[in-house]
Image (cartoon, rainbow, N blue to C red):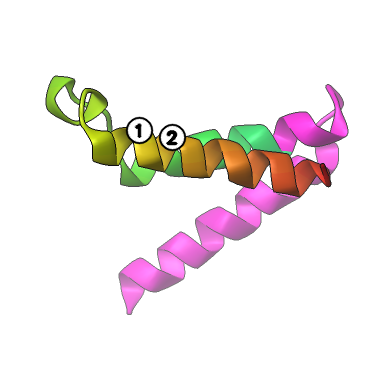
Amino acid sequence: MGDLEQEAQAVEAAAGNLETDTRSPDAGADALVDQWLADYFPPSFITRDSAGWQHIIAAAAELKRRLKGD
């Protein structure tokens, strides 16, 4: 349970940072998606060249687009 609690706290902290991001409204969401992607899918030379990795990257780009309301 401790790991889930730590992860929840990290997500809450990241959400708090979104509110103070002054670059643009979408920059914070993009950064959060990018950080989540790096945390859960660390790139390696094997995964970067796989079809599965390309699918994950496309899904992250789609999530960013949807968060922007496009």
Q: Is the magenta stretch mostly helix, strand or loop?
A: helix
- Mark on residue 40? none
Where residue 44 appears, x then y in whole percent? 19, 25
Whether pointer 1 and pointer 2 mark residues with C-beta atoms closer than 8 Å, the reply is: yes
Q: Say which of 29 and 64 sits in front.
A: 64
List x then y, in percent, for residue 37.
43, 40
Using the image, tell me which numbered label, if any, was put on residue 54.
Answer: 1
Question: What amino acid is at disc 1?
Answer: Gln
Q: Which of 49 and 4 is in front in this view?
A: 49
Residue in the picture at 83% in, 47% down: 69
The quadrant holding residue 9 is bottom right
* Residue segment shown in magenta: 1-28
Q: Residue 12, relative to residue 59: is it above or below?
A: below
- Look at 60% across and 42% down and name the residue there: 62
Where 68 sits versus 44, above or below? below
Q: Quadrant of the C terminus?
A: top right
Q: How crowded is mark 2: few (under 14 residues within 10 Å), some or many (20 or more)?
A: some
Query: In the picture provided, is 57 more to the left or to the right than 27?
Result: left
Q: Does the magenta stretch include residue 12?
A: yes
The residue under the point 72% across, 48% down is 66
Residue type at mark 2 is Ile
Instruction: Judge whether 30 appears above or below 16 on screen.
Output: above
Distance of label 1 from label 2 (alpha carbons): 5 Å
Residue picked out by circle 2:
57
Q: Residue at x 74, y 29 (%)?
A: 27
Q: Image quadrant for the N terminus? A: bottom left
